[in-house]
Image (cartoon, rainbow, N blue to C red):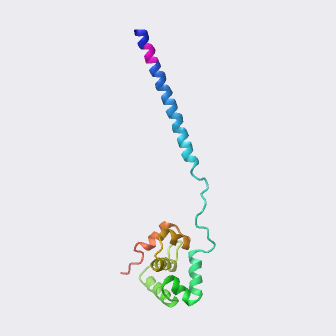
């Protein structure tokens, strides 16, 4: 019986080693597969030739009815609100002018579009758009 028990113990040890080897191989393959799905050079998402700032300039310089249709106010009111925001210490950020921040806010109010669509329109990330919607314009 001792020889039989010893043989069984060797067999169990061999099975444990094989199981560890298979587990290691499967883990490595899983990691390799997951890493292969991560793009090495991510493709830019917002690639329109017309940025949000360029679109806003078109509105300001274009037909008076167009800015009213898109932002819900005429160009003089837009400029007056921008000036008022400057006076209340709001300012342009590194990549987004105060005028574009206001335009983003107004465009959301006028259209009711979700953040993802606003981001596409202004060529900005969803996170950037969210920051300007969530209480950016508090007047003290």
Q: Position of residue 110 (x, y in %)?
A: 47, 80
Q: What secondary structure is the stretch in magenta mostly built from?
A: helix
Mark count: 0
Q: Above or below — where is 117 with respect to 2?
A: below
Q: Where is residue 27 in the image (x, y as percent from the top left)?
A: 51, 38
Q: In which quarter of the image is the N terminus?
A: top left
Q: Position of residue 45 (x, y in %)?
A: 58, 64
In this view of the protein, which residue sits in the foreground, 78 or 6? 6
Q: In which quarter of the image is the C terminus?
A: bottom left
Q: Above or below — where is 25 with respect to 83?
A: above
Query: Is residue 7 a member of the stretch shown in magenta?
Result: yes
User: Residue at 61% of width from left, 68% of height from top?
Assistant: 47
Q: Give the range drawn in magenta.
A: 6-10
In this view of the protein, which residue sits in the foreground, 5 or 139? 5
Which residue reaches farthest right?
49
Which residue reaches farthest left?
140
User: Residue at 60% of width from left, 53% of height from top?
Assistant: 40
Q: Where is residue 18 in the image (x, y as percent from the top left)?
A: 50, 27
User: Residue at 59% of width from left, 87% of height from top?
Assistant: 61
User: Residue at 51% of width from left, 87% of height from top?
Assistant: 68
Q: Above or below — where is 123 with respect to 7?
A: below
Query: Is residue 30 a member of the stretch shown in magenta?
Result: no
């Amino acid at each position: 019986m001792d020889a039989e028990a010893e043989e069984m113990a060797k067999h169990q040890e061999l099975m444990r080693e094989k199981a560890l080897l298979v587990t290691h191989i499967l883990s490595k393959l899983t990691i390799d597969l997951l890493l292969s799905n991560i793009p090495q050079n991510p493709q830019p998402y917002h690639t329109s030739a017309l940025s949000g700032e360029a679109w806003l300039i078109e509105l300001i310089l274009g037909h008076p009815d167009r800015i009213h249709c898109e932002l819900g106010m005429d160009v003089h009111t837009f400029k007056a609100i921008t000036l008022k925001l400057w006076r209340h210490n709001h300012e342009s950020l590194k990549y987004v002018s105060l005028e574009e921040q206001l335009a983003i806010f107004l465009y959301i109010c006028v259209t009711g579009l979700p953040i993802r669509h606003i981001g596409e329109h202004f060529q900005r990330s969803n996170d950037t758009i969210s920051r300007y919607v969530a209480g950016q314009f508090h007047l003290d």
